[in-house]
Image: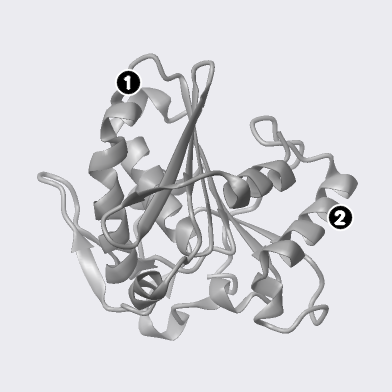
Amino acid sequence: MKLYDLMTECIGITYSEAGTASNYALRRDGDTLYIFFESSNGRLDWQKNFDFPAKPYKRMGQPIWYAHRGFLSAWRDIEPMIAARIADTGIGKVIVTGYSHGAAIALLCHEYVWYNRPDLRRTLEGFGFGCPRVVWGNPSAELSRRWERFTVIRNIDDIVTHLPPAFIGYTHVGKLLTIGKAGKYNKVEAHYAENILAELHLYETAHNHKVGGLHIKFGTLSEKAR
């Protein structure tokens, strides 16, 4: 499956609601579990998008790290709805995907799978299309490994992928795939799903890039990209 196809499915799939403003979808293909998270879909989603203060993500006996409070709240709504599916020992691979607001939740879900299913760490994949920054602070190398297999897809001028601002302490984690050309779209238009898809099509045509069998190697995020 190509990234273009994965994002198309993420946009078009039927979602279930969890809590007041969080939507998810699940699909199983053999032993692979696909988890999708929807983009902003209503006033409450947007309220969570702009709920910038960082909140500690606590687990007993583990280092405390900080995440965007609004996105963390959205993920907490969904977590109990899908925990049992993630825990299913018949699952041999998980692919987590989200667009925009959903990409931020996908990043948190990806870490949850990494933490709770260590047997799946080598096959876990995560993709955040138009993903905002979620993690606050300067994560250690040990913590950053949780997102080694998560890719942020940025249409180069996409304003959402540059928020919340780095100067208030937020950073991207995982790997960064930059597509598109600077100046082709304004900062808002670059985030539109149809424009991300158009640039993905051009990119994958040139690179023969497929999910689950990557034909290129992504570099880790540079300080400038963060």
Q: Is residue 81 left or right of residue 195?
A: left
Amino acid type of the residue that numbered disc 1 sits on in the rendered structure = Asp
Q: Which residue is drawn at the image coordinates 53% and 64% (left, top)?
A: 100
> In this view, which residue lies farthest toward the right?
206
Q: Is residue 126 left or right of residue 60?
A: right
Q: Which residue is drawn at the image coordinates 52% and 70% (left, top)?
A: 226
Q: Rounded to the nearest whole Å, what is the CA distance between mark 2 and mark 1?
A: 37 Å
Amino acid type of the residue that numbered disc 2 sits on in the rendered structure = Leu
Helix, strand or loop under label 2? helix
**Sequence-wise first label, 2 or 1:** 1
Q: Is residue 176 above or below residue 51?
A: above
The mark found on residue 132 in the picture is: none
Q: Which residue is drawn at the image coordinates 64% and 53% (left, top)?
A: 219
Q: Quadrant of the N terminus?
A: top right
Q: Is residue 149 left or right of residue 21?
A: right
For label 2, the residue is 202
- Residue 180 coordinates in the image, percent (x, y): 79, 66
- Can you tell which quarter of the image residue 53 is in? bottom left
Helix, strand or loop under label 1? loop
The crowd level at tag 2 (other Cα within 10 Å; few <14, some 14-19, many 20+) is some
Task: Out of 62 and 157, give the one closest to the viewer.
Answer: 157
- Residue 159 coordinates in the image, percent (x, y): 60, 79
The mark found on residue 88 in the picture is: 1
- Residue 140 coordinates in the image, percent (x, y): 34, 57
Can residue 217 be seen? no
Can residue 220 be seen? yes
Q: Which residue is drawn at the image coordinates 70% and 78% (left, top)?
A: 189
- Residue 64 coordinates in the image, percent (x, y): 19, 57
